């Protein structure tokens, strides 16, 4: 299992050889047909990228997700 980061922002995970990208409202609006599923039991749903060879979709989804997540205020750790 691997976590993926963009400029210190966690945006995706690879579990069981599958890529899962965090869901954002903008990502859902831009890619409404991409399937959603939890990457592991007990996790929230993520966008599951089925065709990792589709570079255009993967790049657009990744850039959009990273941009949106970077604009969100940082959560404070306890």
Image (spheres, helix red, strand yellow):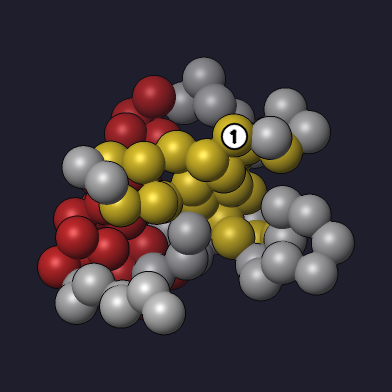
Q: Residue at x 45, y 38 (%)?
A: 4
Residue 35, image x, y percentages: 64, 57
Quadrant for residue 27, please give it.
Answer: bottom left
Q: Is residue 24 above or below residue 60?
A: below
Q: Residues within 10 Å of mark 1 (few under 14, many from 20)?
A: few
Look at the image and tell me in which quarter the C terminus lies: bottom left
x and y, in percent, of residue 69 in the image: 27, 63
Decide: is 10 above or below 24: above
Residue 57 appears in view: no
* Image vertical order of residue 57 relative to residue 54, above or below: below
Placement of the N terminus among the 4 image quadrants: top right
Q: Residue at x 27, y 46 (%)?
A: 8
Q: Residue furthest right?
A: 41
Query: Horizontal placement of 16 versus 59: left or right?
Result: right
Residue 6 visible in the picture: yes
- Residue that carries the numbered disc 1 in the rendered image: 2
Q: Secondary structure at mark 1?
A: strand
């Amino acid at each position: 299992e691997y976590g993926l980061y963009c400029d210190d922002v966690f945006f995706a995970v690879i579990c069981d050889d599958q890529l899962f990208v965090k869901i954002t409202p903008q990502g859902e609006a831009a890619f409404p047909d991409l399937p959603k599923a939890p990457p592991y039991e007990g996790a929230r749903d993520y966008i599951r990228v089925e065709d990792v060879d589709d570079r255009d979709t993967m790049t657009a989804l990744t850039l959009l997700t990273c941009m949106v997540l970077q604009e969100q205020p940082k959560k404070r750790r306890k």
